[in-house]
Image (cartoon, rainbow, N blue to C red):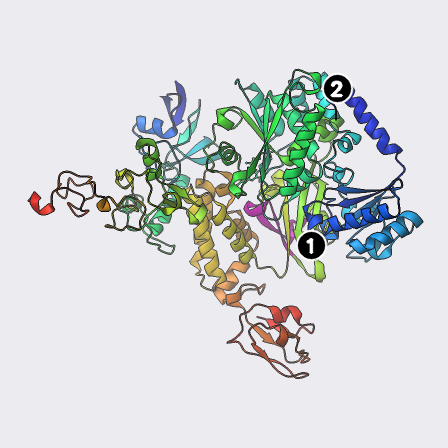
Amino acid sequence: MLTIYINNTEVQAEEGWTILDAAQFYGLAIPTLCHNPGLSNYGGCRLCLVEIGEGKYTKLVSSCTYPIGEGLVVHTDTKRVLEARRMMIELMLSTAPGSKVIQDLASLYGVKQMRFKIRNEECIYCGLCVRMCEEQMDAKAIGFQNRGFKRKISTPFDERSYECRLCGACMYICPACALRCQGPDADTAVCNACLNLDPTCVEVYDELQCWMYDAGQCGTCVKKPSDAK
Amino acid sequence: MHQIKSPQELREAAAEQKRQREAQQKAVLTVSAGTCGQARGSLDVIESLRKIVKEQSLEDRVEVKLTGCHGFCEAEPNIIIQPQNIFYQHVKPNDAAQIIEDTILNNQIIEKLLYKEPTSGKEAIKEEDISFYTKQNRLVLGDNALIEPTQLNEYFSIGGYLALAQVLEDMEPEEVITSILDAGLRGRGGAGFPTGRKWKLTRTVEADKKYIICNADEGDPGAYMDRSLMEGNPHRVLEGMIIGGYAIGADEGFVYIRDEYPLALKHITRAIEQAEEAGVLGENILGSSFSFKVNIVKGAGAFVCGEETALMRSIEGKVGEPRQRPPFPAVSGLWKRPTNINNVETWANVPLIILRGAQWYSEIGTEGSKGTKIFSLVGKINNTGLVEVPMGITLREIIYDIGGGIPGGKQFKAVQTGGPSGGCLPAEKLDLPIDYESLTQAGSIMGSGGMIVMDEDTCMVDVSKYFLNFLRDESCGKCLSCREGTQRMWEVVSDICDGNGKESDIQLLEELAVAVKDASMCGLGQTAANPVLSTLRYFREEYDAPIKDQRCPAGVCKALISYSIVAENCTGCMACLKACPEGAITGVLKEVHVLNQEKCIKCGACFEVCKFDAIKIE
Ligand SMILES: Cc1cc2nc3c(=O)[nH]c(=O)nc-3n(C[C@H](O)[C@H](O)[C@H](O)COP(=O)(O)O)c2cc1C
Ligand code: FES
């Protein structure tokens, strides 16, 4: 057991935990986006920032990746943390204003302006889908391409990947909906389950149960939507 | 070469080489042939020199030596003639005959090849008379001019591997570390972390295997001191690594070098082979129980792969993206083993400290920064080149005394230090003694030693746009703060340059810059805002002018300037008319020309060719 100090409170934490683990264990809310307990830690979205250290020597770190050590001093909601976090949300919002997840974050943190040019993209490169595909689905069908502002997520050479089993887990976990079904399109690399002859759903589900939220529309269910009624 | 089996045997071999060097009566022509020299044709010079030597059968009187970069790139290709130390610059292949005939055989100086001081116009005959060299203290780089980098014996002749012999013979690993600690050596790759402390940490961690890395990624635009060292003196870097391996308890090392440095790659590869053959590298070095091997890994040139954790991932064959520290490489680095990574220049300092002592070394430099630092002095400066100076020297001394000031009688405006993530310092800071702390306090960084001088014709907003463009491209893209932050800063600054800036943009830039600095995981993002923050701090009016009055004071940003012809000055020489690629200038000989604004693409070609100050930029 290690002793650490979160928001001026002395607490015990287990070796190997991240700051986020410890904070969550003690019921402190730290917003996260690229973090998922079932996947490896990544540290890409920078939402989970906290301030560590004391006096003059403090800095911001992503709590989801920073391992705790004996005597670590953490503050989860200083002015500096909030300012940086708001800027992160504003950056995300300007890039993908259509995402419900990001809109909710903006309203929670009072981000009311988008001072950057709105881009209407659908990806914030949190990498959840990439890790999902590799770590949970064991497929490694998608990955990052390029770096910097040219970064994107796709299959190798943007071609239909035969590693991809069309499981849809990438779409399931996406907070910004980049890979959300756009209907059948032979040119897109990911999924296209609807063009696949093998159905992914044997049953037709209603609006609420269908994980694509559009009962029958993706066209992969065996039964016709009309039969379901 | 046969295997050397003991430190004693090495000492004898080195002493023999030294004796031969001193005893030789030949005139030695050392031709600077690093990548910079070769690009300016030094290989042709060497070829014609050698040809003439052969034709005239002068082999026993003259030796032509192909060395690494001598540092004075402005004067490339240059030759130093020993023993007199005569310095000839801008030598062409057809000068070869005259050099042999006049200087070597008849002891006459060839005036046209002498270097002339840019300020006084005075000619300098010897290397030591040139002001570029007088204020330097070339402890690390100086050897480049003495040896052929591809010959191990040459390195032996100047005391090569003697530090290693000393370490293996009578120093415990801990003593080596203490020596580096006492010397006060700090990392030359950027952050300036005390090298001895890093070594000590890596030594104390228990593990079945440890690694050493030499960071030769050198990604800063305009910086090339690491390349020069690897090309001109690879054995010295290698010796530093071997000593480091012994001190830390590592038995394997990696040199991570970018593939864009083919000559450096060739020389370090050859050096490793030679060192293994000679028994100073490999199994049971110099007959001791210490074994060490070195591998080379070629990088593809991504700037971020110079960051230590990204570099290690790259060596492991993964995508070069930085990861969270801690754990620090000293605890868990390459393949999760304790790893000590240092910069090329840091390694090259190690043999020096061992041989001349920590005490001696720590007397050079300032309180917190010891030794010398190599800077690559580039941009609007008369003497472009690599300069090695003691820490604590002022920027003014580097720029005016060593660099010879600004060409064309222009005014100095700023100096950018520390590469893309460094900052721009104005004229008020010229008397700043440079070390790690002072530069950071002034809003820049030491970085790996890039130093770009800018004159009055430089627009600081444009400069900050340039670096942001570099960074948005070179950010790995993992952290939102860095990927989006650099992109958005670039967008805002570009808008300002295009005349579309808003008054609120400055505040937005400041807010964003702080957030990017605070929120990013690795050094790239944490320093990415420096170009913006430092130009805002020192050159605020250059941001205000385009926003408030749609004006670019330096006359650089195309959207904000127009070219026109000053009728009083125009002689009607037709030079601009011919230079204009768009046919925007019309007129006849000896009459004032007319510039059609509609057709003008603001390329500046007319401005460049006009000899009568008749083109005005507004
Ligand atoms: C974006 C980035 C790029 C870097 N590039 C280099 C480089 O090209 N060469 C280098 O030696 N260090 C570079 N560094 C610093 C290394 O991470 C590391 O600190 C250094 O190699 C340690 O060696 P030193 O202690 O001898 O300086 C870079 C750091 C960052 C954040
Ligand atoms: S949740 Fe920690 S960086 Fe995204």
Q: Residue furthest right?
A: B106
- Tell me if A165 is positioned left or right of B294 in this view: left
x, y percentage for residue B323?
Answer: 46, 34
In front: B534, or B194?
B194
**Type of the residue with mark 1:** Ile
Which of the labelled discs sits on residue B381, or is there none?
A: 1
**Count of number-bearing discs:** 2
Percent position of residue B184, x then y: 66, 29
On the image, the x and y values in percent for residue B351 come to: 71, 28
**Image quadrant of ligand 2?**
top left
Q: Which residues are magenta?
A: B413-432
Q: Earlier in the sequence, mark 1 or mark 2?
A: 2
Q: Is residue B312 visible?
A: yes
In the image, residue B424 lies in the stretch drawn in magenta: yes
Q: Chain of mark 1?
A: B
In the structure shown, which secondary structural element does the residue marked by tag 2 occupy?
A: helix
Q: Residues within 10 Å of mark 2 (few under 14, many from 20)?
A: many
- Picture layout, residue B93 above or below residue B212: below
